[in-house]
Amino acid sequence: MDKLVITGGNPLFGSIEINGAKNAAVAILPAAIMASKNKCVIDNIPNIEDVHCIERILKSLGCDIKTKKNSATIDSTHIASLSANTDDVRKMRASYYLIGALLGRFKKASVELPGGCPIGVRPIDQHIKGFEALGAKVKITHGSVMVEADELIGTNIFFDVVSVGATINVMLAATLAKGVTTLENVAKEPHVVDVANFLNSMGANIKGAGTDVIRIVGVESLSGCTYSVIPDQIEAGTYMIASAACGGEVTIENVIPKHLESISAKLVEMGSEIRENGDSITVKSSGNLKGVNIKTQPYPGFPTDVQQPMSTLLTVAKGRSIINESIWESRFKHVDELKKMGANIKVEGRTAIIDGVDKLTGAVVKATDLRAGAAMVIAGLIAEGTTEVLSIEHIDRGYPNIEDKFKALGAYIHRECE
Ligand code: EPZ
């Protein structure tokens, strides 16, 4: 198992480039199998394990995929199997998008229940509610979700909770349903909009993505297209937080600043300086910041996916900070690791109370999940002495070349292979 070894205390200076969005790419790649004609060419795909995992799953279904750097050409005209049941499917969350994609195109699918980060219960009842409303029969047996329909018929669906996964999954199926589907109380995350734009480029008729209501006029078939994935809001947010924590001045290129507003606002409230310039954002910080309160919320609120990196920054901010994690009930597993480094944090249910300390000290810690891993890397960067971050396979699932990017900014960080 690899580990990251970090000697902390260096301010960060320079610029780095953000890659394509993980959570858009892992939905767009499965959506590509809905093209019954022509190939999809998808650019700006991040080089991360979750993407490799989806690509292997698509190959197992009979897709022909050619990858080159950050681009994939997918020919799904000759899909051979409607059953996804490999280890890869069980390993990751986004494999559930195969249900909506296969159901939409073939009206049938069998997909093993998905895995993903251990951050909460992660039900899929809203996905199922949507598929059933469109006319599909859904059964869960032997750990697989089986869906089947004679035909899918558009309808009105009001989601009980705002769910990124359910919004995208039901949108996929409804794209090839007969008639009009209206999805209400939907997620508005940038990757939801990106998937809708991708489907529209394939010939779908989807309007309203990015608002509370998405209206889909079903089409007969979809055709391949060329598409470029949006920049990763969460990767960008993670580097912004790291820059604020370490002090210095970092320009983060290839971002959509609008997607980062809730993060920028908190960093400014803490005392950092943020400058937006076209598709880049610069974070300047003295490293001496004050504590703030945070409540994670669906977009455009503060994203749960940067809550863990942010909590690291708050461990060394002046005064008391309170984090309320309203999306995932178990997203504080990294707190015990931060405590090993001297952080003063108390967790009560979904709330973390953080009293800022003067410094963290290096320790051997582990990445308990993907974003927890990023949190521990930032902790290592600000800590006195040396930190070893173990279980970094979690980090490799979602952050391309993390050590190279931090090295380029002047950090002492390297990977050791064991
Ligand atoms: C997506 O997960 C992301 N994953 C997560 O990012 C992210 O934390 C989450 O959205 C929220 O933004 C991917 O895009 C692959 P949800 P998803 O459905 O779709 C409840 C990361 O770090 N819910 O929006 O699984 C659920 O329990 C990952 O990159 C139901 O009750 O999340 C949660 O409380 C981790 N029933 C809330 O909704 C359902 O059927 C939001 O979940 C579905 C969800």
Image: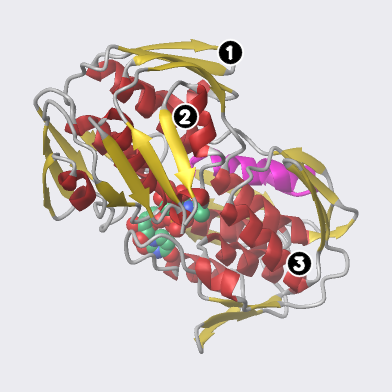
| Magenta stretch, residue numbers | 188-212
Q: Nearer the viewer, residue 245 or 319?
A: 245
Q: Which mark is residue 22?
A: none
As drawn, is 280 to the left or to the right of 62?
left
As drawn, is 293 to the left or to the right of 181?
left
Whether tag 3 and tag 1 are in contact, CB under 8 A, the answer is: no
Q: Position of residue 89 (x, y in %)?
A: 58, 70
Q: Which mark is residue 278?
A: 1
The three-letter amino acid code for the residue at tag 1 is: Gly
Q: Position of residue 403 (x, y in %)?
A: 49, 36
Quadrant location of ligand 1? bottom left
Of tags 1 and 2, the one toward the viewer is 2
Dot placed on the residue nearer the N-terminal end, 3 or 1: 3
Whether tag 2 and tag 3 are in contact, CB under 8 A, the answer is: no
As drawn, is 257 to the left or to the right of 135?
left
Q: Which mark is residue 59?
A: 3
In which quadrant of the rendered view does residue 112 lie? bottom right
Whether tag 1 and tag 2 are in contact, CB under 8 A, the answer is: no
Magenta stretch contains residue 90: no
- Element type at mark 1: loop
Q: Nearer the viewer, residue 148 or 396?
A: 396
Mark 2 residue CB less than 8 A from any atom of ligand 1: no
Q: Which residue is rendered at x = 47% and y = 68% of the image?
A: 115
Q: Which residue is mark 2?
A: 406
